[in-house]
Amino acid sequence: MQVATGKSILNGIAIGKIKVYRAPRLVISDAMVNDVEAELARFESAREKAVAQQSALYDKALVEAGEENAAVFEIHGMMLEDDDLIDAICEIIQKQQKNAEYAVKTACDNQARVFAEMDDPYMNARSADIDDIGRSMLDFLMGNDLSSLQGSEPSILVAEDLAPSETVRLDKSLLLGFVTREGSTNSHTAILARSMNIPALVQCGEASADWDGKTAIIDGYNSCIYIEPTEDLMASLKKRREEDQAKTALLQELKGKDNTTIDGKTVKVYANIGGPSDIGAVQQNDAGGVGLFRTEFVYLNSKESPTEEQQFQAYRHVLESLAPKQVIVRTCDIGADKTVDYMKLDAEENPALGYRAIRICLTRKEFFRTQLRALLRASAYGNMGIMFPMIISVRELREAKEILEECRQELLGEGVKVGEYEIGTMIETPAAAILADELAEECDFFSIGTNDLTQYTCAIDRQNAKLEPFSDTHHPAVLRLIQMTIEAGHRHGTWVGICGELGADLSLTETFLRMGVDELSVNPKSVLPLRKTIRGINLKNDPCGCGGS
């Protein structure tokens, strides 16, 4: 038996035979061509097919991984329409009289290198996206059929790496799990694998083509893969897999139950969503409401600034579908790692600390007013909370509220019905946590965004895979800021929720309940496991076993 280690994407067990995934080698000739126009037409045909492919992958990912995770393919489609990239490829074909394959490979390699050499980790990651769309065009140019690479039997795939498009194109019914030599736990591929509930290991340097056809077990709990496991180990991990399946079935029995501890404390358990396509997941997993509705999908899925009517229809659909459940809508959080060309945002050396979210909205007020009017109109169709992101001062919150009130008065003057709504702010910076007492006087609720709060408190870029060894998601400074925020909110009658990744960390659930948190908002798939944990907690027990003296 051989044991190889890597970094686990998902706690789970996958058992089966290994299929080594060998993508066709790209042998690109640099031969000159005589018919330049024919070569330009070949390129354009391949590009159009690649655009259509990204659209199909978006639709597939939408179903399998949700709106937010599918957005990468929307971005890929935009990249394939980028004039600079198209011009660079056409220039090589026309001026150098090279074939389309050579032109695509050269132009994409050059563009990927530009991104790879940037200091910003988000822009570094765009290098892999360029490689992905370049490979897509080359496959069409060269007639590569990737459909047979997975084989016809359920298997564990082993590969050098998998691009997001490759991951989504795989037949999920034949995919037991996968192992790659390269990759990152924060990559789009890893996020997609988690969303699709696929056990996987990345950065498994010992992965080998010699494993092809051998029986193996991916042990996501221990971040390893066993090649040709012993009978005892096979029996043990089969039992663990059966236990996991039984737990999943048991969780379904929790539907309709209260999120109440043994000693009677009830907490709201809501879901985070990325768009209307996640409505089904909210209902299927019995979430009490939506604690974070990311409105970025409206902007990322549009080639120009979305109109008030387009936004209204999208927001109304979600509110109406989930009524009377509360839906907390976060206003536009474009910027940092989420950009769209039509907003013409300047490149920044430090975008995570730059022009994003409320900072854009307060300096582009007509843009902000368009969204606020759409939200206010939608409020008549459900139970809405409006939440402002990246607030760091009372002045910003007051200004945002003033613009919201101006929009409300405008709509009422136009005879448009506006519903009731709560106003909240995200606490995702140390500044906001420290000012929580003052901010609480200005709003109805807080939602703590632990992802950014951790990043800004610890000065750890969460997009940078190299910093994983330095990252501590349970950092005591972050937990103290959460405690401070909850206490400050309660002093002023403001309820407090958590909508970041830590909300789904079951090892912290009891800690958060003891802090007094009112609401936890998590990925829809985490709702029932969180409910089960809450129902097993007794807050009257002494947490430290010291008798409370």
Image: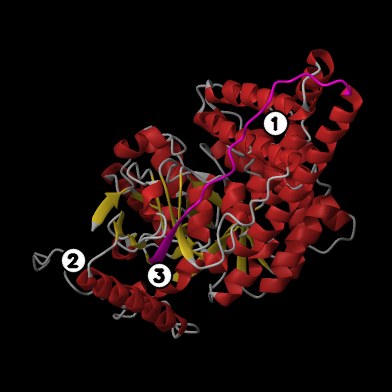
Image-based side of 480 in relation to 202, left or right: left
Q: Which residues are magenta?
A: 15-35
The amino acid beneath tag 3 is Leu
The amino acid beneath tag 1 is Thr
Image-based side of 176 in relation to 549, left or right: right
198 is higher (above) or lower (below) than 478: below
- Residue that badge 3 annotates: 530
401 is higher (above) or lower (below) than 492: above
Q: Is residue 18 magenta?
A: yes
Location of the N terminus (image quadrant): bottom left
Locate residue 337: give its quadrant.
top right
Residue at the spot x=64%, y=71% of the render? Answer: 280
Helix, strand, or loop for circle 2? loop
Residue at the spot x=60%, y=27% of the render? Answer: 112
- Residue that badge 1 annotates: 363
Helix, strand, or loop for circle 1? helix
**In x, y percent, where is residue 358?**
62, 39
Image-based side of 91 in relation to 257, left or right: right
Image-based side of 461 in relation to 6, left or right: right
Q: Nearer the viewer, residue 412 or 345?
A: 345
- Residue that badge 2 annotates: 543
Q: Is residue 147 magenta?
A: no
Residue at the spot x=60%, y=75% of the render? Answer: 283
Is most of the magenta stretch helix, strand or loop? loop
Q: CA distance from mark 1 to mark 2?
A: 48 Å
Helix, strand, or loop for circle 3? helix
